[in-house]
Amino acid sequence: MIPLSVLDLVPVREGSDAATALREAGELANVAEEAGYKRFWVAEHHATPGIAGGATAVVLAHIGHATSTIRVGSGGIMLPNHNPFVIAEQFGTLDALFPGRIDLGLGRAPGAAPILGQALRKDLRSAADYFPQDVVELRALLTGDIDLPIAATPGLGSNVQMWMLGSSLFGAQLAARLGLPYAFASHFAPDHLDAALETYRSQFQPSTVLDKPHAMAAMTMICADSDEEAALLASSQDQSFVRLRSGDPGKLPPPKPGYRESLDLSSRAMLERMDVARAVGSPATVAAKIDRFVARTQADEIIVSGATFDPKARQRSLRLAIDALN
């Protein structure tokens, strides 16, 4: 079976709070580990009431302590928000705490509205222009492959696995040039999936950490006893995505029967466009959709996202899906 991993945004449910969301993320990671998932990643998002993963390295320390064997990492750290030295120290510390289990996925987007730059005291547009150089510097701070005048401690010599993330061709080209594994965000941006994977594979240059291309693709995945139950559970995430794209993000809402059918044509089409990387349904339905997606993409790994209002439903979803694929 192709390796499966979990991407979590640490969703905050309506009527709940960040403390509860963080506890539930630890419980979910523990379930993922027991079920046999390979990685548990947390994504950096800021100033969003329904997401509690903004201090990503701190959250990963919590996840690491809640688990013992599953790889723990960022999906990803939005590097323009930070300087490479601080990230090297943070992830070097995580590797010291959880040796051989830490992944560092890097993205170029800010992970929030433009006002974030003011809060961070940074020109994020300019910082994004330096992303390739910052990635190279960060790798050097971890590996020592370039002689730098300062050493990150912890950091230098740590066993952190770096990944390049992307939702366009830019990340694919950079991952190929640096010889890094590549993860594509097809769960929310599927349009360039095929072109990005082809670009990454055709332009890949072997490195000291990777001798051939290694690609991961993301899917939305919610599994339940029936297709109907899974569709109802998925309506919480559908609502959140429509609200986000409408400029009105909020906490994760409860399921809403018939939600997609209630939408205007534009909003419904937006959701349906992402269905190419969506596996929602019974165990048999989910297994078939993941199998078709793997056959299409030839991905080396799949990472699944998909929040449910009831955290127990997502735990059960992870168990049902991996059992169906075994």
Image (cartoon, rainbow, N blue to C red):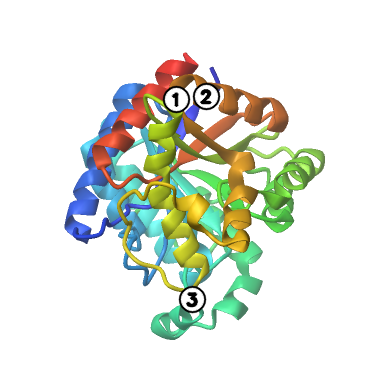
Amino acid carrying label 3: it is Ala
In this view, the residue in front, 225 or 48, is 225
Residue at coordinates 18% horizontally, 53% vertically from top-left? 20
Residue 96 visible? The answer is: yes
Disc number at residue 282? 1
Q: Does residue 28 sit above or below 174 in this rendering?
A: above
Looking at the rendered structure, which numbered label has been put on residue 113? 3
Whether pointer 3 and pointer 2 mark residues with C-beta atoms closer than 8 Å, the reply is no
| x and y, in percent, of residue 311 in the image | 26, 41
Q: Is residue 69 visible?
A: no
Numbered disc 2: secondary structure: helix
Are circles 2 and 1 on residues that touch, CB within 8 Å?
A: yes
**Place of residue 254 in the rendered image (x, y in percent of width and height, measured from the top left):** 30, 52
Q: Position of residue 118 (x, y in %)?
A: 44, 86
Residue behind mark 2 = 285
**Please, is residue 275 above or below residue 156 in the view?**
above
Q: Secondary structure at mark 1?
A: loop
First along the sequence among labels 3 and 2: 3
Going 72% across and 37% down the picture, which residue do you hit? 206
**Residue furthest right in the image:** 202
Nearer the observer, 27 or 191 = 191
